[in-house]
Image (cartoon, helix red, strand yellow):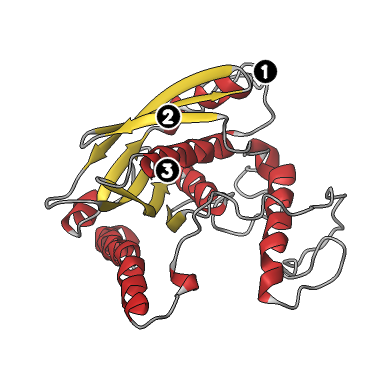
Amino acid sequence: MRFHWHRYRPRVWAAAALMAAASLTAPSLTAQADAADGHVAAAQVQAAVEDDGAGCAVPTPGSSPANPLLPDPFRKVNGTRISAKSDWRCRRTEIRELAQSSVYGQKPARPASVTGTVSASGITVNVTDQGRSASFSASVSLPSGSGPFPAVVVLGGLGADTATLKASGVAVINYDPYTVGREGTARNNKQGAFYSVYGSSSSTGLLMAWSWGVSRIIDVIAQSGGNLLKADATGVTGCSRFGKGALVAGAFDQRIGLTMPIESGSGGVPVLRGGFRGKTTPSL
């Protein structure tokens, strides 16, 4: 029996959107219930910082041995295996560094200054770091009712069932990644807000630059006071290349409560071992 994916895809996306809405609203409800019982549900509360492992000492990754199998995520760079939950914070930082050095390029630490505004129609972001400044914006579409609302950042405005999200009480933030990192430019003439700050020849790739933009949007939401949007109930999604960007954004910012890549293809959710469909690590 042949399954006609394209016939059922809108229904699948609608179901995924409903699950997303439930996931973003559930943590606050769970936390309230646990607080009433005198308990703390740490697993249900999002990290208040972009990267809680920033203080971990991470050895410089050397050359990786050839291995056709997936590596053990719990084995540290020095060969020892972590044995306690508390060890994961710094092991996660090692994995982050491996991904940055091997695939995406470095994501800079939080800029010296991030300011902006949040309104019912849009978000503005102003960044200053290392003596350089840049700005970009994203549009906002609110559901009916009164806030504050959980929100989903939609990269490129593609793929997400935004009508279902809004009907479920979730705001939609439409973010154009090309304002932060433009495609089709020479490696020594990269353009967009990220490269205006960190240099047109920065070794940081587009996916990480797009991820940086999502983090700066969350910074502004967090500074806004939470009257309209909830910084601690934020999801991210995108389709195709923007699905890759959503994956990287969720992996490199612990404040993101839900990451939903759609049809991200090779270099996205699927295992990246070797090159597939002509895509290799340098092309990302």
Residue 131 x %, y %: 61, 17
- Residue type at mark 3: give it: Ile
Mark 2 and mark 1 lie on one chain; the one further toward the N terminus is: 2
Between the C-alphas of marks 3 and 2, the distance is 11 Å
Residue 53 x %, y %: 66, 55
From the image, state whether disc 1 or disc 3 is nearer to you. 3
Q: What residue is rendered at 40% in x and 50% in y?
A: 237
Q: Nearer the viewer, residue 152 or 156?
A: 152
Q: Eyeballing the image, is 168 above or below 279?
A: below
Between the C-alphas of marks 1 and 3, the distance is 29 Å
- Residue type at mark 2: give it: Thr
**How many C-alpha atoms fall within 10 Å of the one at disc 2: few (<14), some, or many (≥20)?**
some
| Residue 183 visible to the viewer | no
Q: Nearer the viewer, residue 134 or 184?
A: 134
Disc 3 designates what residue? 218
**How many C-alpha atoms fall within 10 Å of the one at disc 1: few (<14), some, or many (≥20)?**
few
Q: What residue is rendered at 76% in x and 73% in y?
A: 82
From the image, state whether disc 2 or disc 1 is nearer to you. 2
Residue 79 x %, y %: 87, 67
Q: Nearer the viewer, residue 63 or 143?
A: 143
Mark 1 and mark 3 lie on one chain; the one further toward the N terminus is: 1
Residue 92 x %, y %: 67, 60
Between the C-alphas of marks 2 and 1, the distance is 28 Å
In the image: residue 90, left or right of residue 147: right
Disc 2 designates what residue? 115
- Residue type at mark 1: give it: Asn
| Residue 194 visible to the viewer | yes
**How many C-alpha atoms fall within 10 Å of the one at disc 3: few (<14), some, or many (≥20)?**
many
